[in-house]
Image (cartoon, helix red, strand yellow):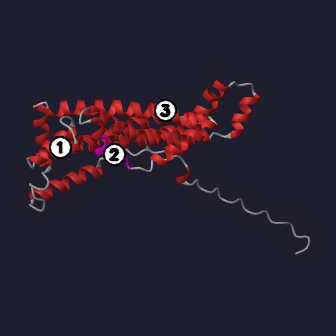
């Protein structure tokens, strides 16, 4: 009606916050073990009831007993030490070369023209298929194994470092130059922080490839290491020892990946995405 006072609208109730919009909570440690424990229980039940033949795959109890035996005899510690040494040397070699080439090709126009095309072509080759050639060229000693690990590590490190350097915001670079930064200060304060997330991603990928490379290298041609222990157990149909070696490889891969994730969380603490992400 004309002249009637306008009725004030009732205040709307506040919208409850979306729980999914906040930072995700990390799962308790015990919850992460539910699936692995369930798999082991089903595996043991299948072995006990005869659904899984012992000569095809040993039961978890036999695997645990075999792990204790090869530990007491020194076979497992010695093999573990040899494999670790090969991975460390190969990883350091490949990481240093990949890092240097990635930074050079990312920062320098001429470096990109000279380095990036051949690296992009070579990375399409499956490096594990080079094992026969490496044995032919370098023999069956340590060199082919270390080089195979180094080659597998080089490409993910190079690709991620190169992409990280090239992906630095040009506005930040221009702002740094306007502020009077010299080339070294630009690299230290702008390029390195900008490329670090991508470089750490490459580090995680390369560690997984490093362990995959040493597994193949040691099982194809080796007289020591975890791969040799697995190959020797295969000759005697010791599936329990084979599983022990595979489990150790898996634990080493998980352990190194967890270490890099921990470094990643600390180094990239300034990133809000990682602050609430699950570890």
Q: Which circle's residue, 3 or 2, is located before the other in the chain?
A: 2
Q: Nearer the viewer, mark 3 or mark 2?
A: 2
Residue 266 is marked as: 3
Residue 206 place in picture, x, y as percent: 41, 41
Q: Residue at x 42, y 36 (%)?
A: 260
Disc with the residue nearer the chain's start (1 vs 2): 2
Residue that carries the numbered disc 1 in the rendered image = 230
| 10 Å crowding of disc 2: few (<14), some (14-19), many (20+) | some
The region drawn magenta spans: 126-135
Q: Secondary structure at mark 2?
A: helix
Disc number placed over residue 130 in the picture, else none: 2
Left or right of 177, for residue 157: left
| Residue 129 falls within the magenta-colored stretch | yes
Between residue 153 and residue 119, name the one nearer to us. 119
Q: Quadrant of the N terminus?
A: bottom right
What SS does tag 3 mark?
A: helix
Q: Residue at x 24, y 33 (%)?
A: 141
Looking at the image, which residue is at 34% across and 42% down?
A: 29
Q: Secondary structure at mark 1?
A: helix
């Amino acid at each position: 009606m004309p002249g009637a006072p306008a009725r004030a609208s009732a205040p709307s109730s506040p919208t409850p916050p979306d729980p999914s919009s906040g930072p995700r909570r990390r799962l308790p440690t015990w919850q992460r073990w539910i699936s692995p424990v369930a798999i082991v229980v089903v595996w043991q039940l299948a072995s006990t009831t005869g659904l899984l033949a012992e000569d095809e795959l040993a039961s978890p109890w036999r695997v645990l007993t075999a792990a204790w035996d090869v530990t007491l005899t020194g076979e497992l510690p010695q093999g573990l030490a040899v494999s670790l040494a090969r991975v460390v040397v190969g990883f350091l070699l490949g990481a240093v070369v990949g890092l240097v080439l990635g930074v050079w090709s990312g920062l320098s126009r001429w470096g990109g023209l000279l380095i990036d095309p051949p690296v992009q072509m070579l990375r399409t080759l499956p490096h594990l298929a080079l094992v026969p050639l490496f044995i032919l060229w370098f023999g069956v000693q340590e060199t082919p194994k270390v080089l195979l690990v180094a080659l597998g590590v080089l490409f993910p490190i190079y690709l991620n470092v190169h992409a990280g350097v090239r992906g630095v915001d040009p506005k930040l670079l221009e702002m740094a130059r306007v502020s009077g930064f010299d080339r070294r200060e630009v690299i230290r304060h702008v390029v390195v922080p900008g490329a670090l997330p991508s470089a750490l991603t490459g580090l995680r990928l390369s560690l997984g490839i490093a362990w995959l490379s040493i597994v193949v290298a040691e099982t194809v041609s080796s007289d020591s290491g975890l791969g040799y222990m697995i190959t020797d157990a295969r000759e005697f149909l010791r599936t329990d020892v084979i599983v022990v070696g595979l489990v150790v490889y898996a634990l080493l891969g998980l352990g190194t990946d967890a270490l890099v994730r921990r470094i990643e969380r600390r180094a990239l603490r300034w990133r809000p995405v990682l602050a609430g992400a699950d570890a």
